[in-house]
Amino acid sequence: MRNQDHSASGEIAPKNTGRVKGHDFSRADALLKMNGALAPEGSSSTSTAHDHPAAHSGLSKIPKPVHARPSPLVLILLGPTGSGKTALSLELADRFAGEIVSCDSVAVYRGMDLGSAKPSPEERSRAPHHLIDVADPDEPMTAGAYSRAARAALADITARAHLPIVTGGTGLYLRALTEGLFAGPQRDEDLRKRLRASATKHGSSWLHRILTRLDPSTADRIHANDTPKLIRAVEVCLAGRRPMSAVFASQDEARDPLTGYRLLRIGLNPPRQALYEHLNRRCAEMFAAGLVEEARRLLACYGRVKALDSLGYRQALSVIDGEADLPAAVAAAQQGHRNYAKRQLTWFRREPDVHWIEAFGDDPATLATVKQIVEASQCGPTP
């Protein structure tokens, strides 16, 4: 008798069907089909072009600055939320004729002011700012779209012989800007819809179990509660019929890294307890300043768009929906921001050649140290 294996649906299938180097696609497919997350064979679905910077002809049209050696310097200020990046960027812009390129996935949206802690009008009057208030909340701003816009801003700023200061805490945006994105399979909106429905019904941990069957190494890197990343990872595995980790490995040369600039990375890492206390105060101030009212206006204008699921706004909506009172919402937002800061530091620790400073950005000693680093880097290779 031939070796046989029972799939999750109870059907008998050849033992090796659908397996790719130890990754169990047949069993994962069966689980997805049982729960309606995977369309039956032969059905069609709607796909849209993947969002890779190199896949858009607009990127090739970005003007390249004409410059002498050395290449123009780009200063990158990174670090967790609440670490003082905005304050430091403004001081450096004053000192070095800088222009600030925001790297924040919420500050790009108009009307999302309090919850994003975007620079105030007074702060923005001190130096030119780019990529703030460039989209409405119902317009998705992907990492690829951000990368194209930010690269255009860098070219524009350096053409004026000014210093670009990339400032923000959205790690994926920064990676898309500096390294490019891998050219993964096309987005399958029908599959995504089914996977989101399954996650709503069974919980995101169910998607994580599916991903573990398809690609254990990628599943190890994605938190079981990170539904958007889980959906994309499962989508890539199913579309490519191989693990996402293998797709990444084969696409390394297809990335479109930023070239023609010298990158100087400065990282802020204040003492953890002081950072958490600052975040607690800032969250309370956001709600006191009218975050619930701001969320209510956005909800009336745009409905429950994805942007309103960001930190602060999510908790404000819980008050509007009657799911939490104001003190509970504030406490949840405070906890969420503390957790987010921790994840940001984990992400940024993987960035290369970062000059880490164990202090807040508004500390005079921090400003003095960073000024010295920038001055030493302006006329030659970055240290």
Image (cartoon, rainbow, N blue to C red):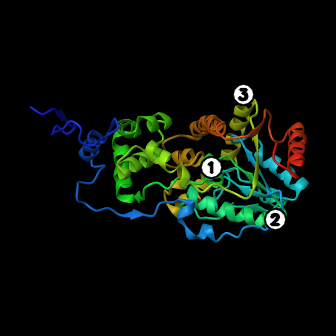
At horizontal 34% and vertical 43% (from top left) the residue drawn is 201
Secondary structure found at label 1: helix
Q: Position of residue 288 (x, y in %)?
A: 69, 45
| Type of amino acid at the residue the image marks with label 2 | His
Rendered view: 171 above or below 306: above
- Name the mark on residue 49: none
| Type of amino acid at the residue the image marks with label 3 | Gln
| Type of amino acid at the residue the image marks with label 1 | Arg
Secondary structure found at label 2: loop
* Residue under label 1: 175
Tell me whether circle 2 and circle 1 mark residues in contact (CB < 8 Å). Answer: no
* Camera-nearest label, 2 or 1: 2
At horizontal 45% and vertical 35% (from top left) the residue drawn is 217
Q: Position of residue 141 (x, y in %)?
A: 57, 60
Count of marks, rendered view = 3
- Name the mark on residue 67: 2
Q: Position of residue 150 (x, y in %)?
A: 67, 60
Q: Toward the viewer: 309 or 76?
A: 76
Q: Quadrant of residue 20?
A: top left
Q: Position of residue 237 (x, y in %)?
A: 38, 47
Secondary structure found at label 3: helix
Which sits earlier in the primary sequence, circle 2 or circle 1?
Answer: 2
Dot 2: within a 10 Å radius of its alpha carbon, few (fewer than 14), some, or many (20 or more) residues?
few
* Camera-nearest label, 1 or 3: 1
Left-right relation of 112 to 14: right
Q: CA distance from mark 3 to mark 2?
A: 45 Å
Which sits earlier in the primary sequence, circle 3 or circle 2?
Answer: 2
Is residue 370 visible to the viewer in this orientation of the structure? yes
